[in-house]
Image (tube, grey):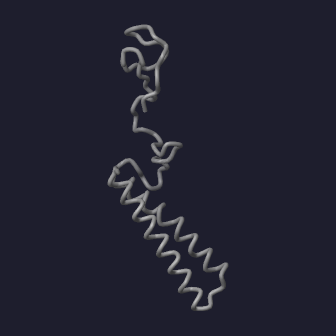
Amino acid sequence: MNPQLKRYYIFLGASLVFSIGLQIILGYLGVPWFISIGLVMAIFIMLPMIMRRRQMSRMGNYDGDSGTGGGFFGMGSQGGSGGVRYVCLVCSNKHKGGTCPRCGSKMQRADF
């Protein structure tokens, strides 16, 4: 298993245990259940977001307020990488699109 994924699962489990423990403590203190559940849900949602932000800033491709690092796949703008490139499935040639300039095949896959 990937060590980063393992660390994420451990962190997620620890935040779940912390959230449940906090809910039990708040229940004993007499805090209404809807307030304690709201607080626990906020913590359970915010901790993975904070962890992701720290990890992305360590990788160097996340600038906190410029909006990069988002996107559907979490990549955002790729820093001027030239857009999408394609790989020919027949001869494995990398090219910009359309037919393969080496073999003329139209069978290709996107390479991000």
Residue at the front extreme of this rendering: 1
In the visual, does 49 lie left or right of 54? Answer: right
The number of numbered discs placed on residues in the rendered structure image is 0
At which x and y percent is residue 62?
Answer: 41, 50
Nearer to us in this view, 15 or 52: 15
Residue at 43% from the left image edge and 13% from the top image edge:
100
Q: In this view, does 60 lie above or below 19?
A: above
At which x and y percent is residue 76?
Answer: 47, 42
At which x and y percent is residue 112?
Answer: 43, 33
Q: Is residue 50 above or below residue 85?
A: below
Q: Where is residue 32, by image quadrant?
A: bottom right
Q: Is residue 95 above or below residue 49?
A: above
Residue at 46% from the left image edge and 47% from the top image edge:
68
Q: Where is residue 57, by image quadrant?
A: bottom left
Residue at 58% from the left image edge and 70% from the top image edge:
41
At which x and y percent is residue 13?
Answer: 45, 67
Q: Is residue 21 above or below residue 98?
A: below
Residue at the bottom extreme of this rendering: 29
Residue at 56% from the left image edge and 74% from the top image edge:
40
Nearer to us in this view, 79 or 17: 17
In the visual, does 82 lie left or right of 38? Answer: left
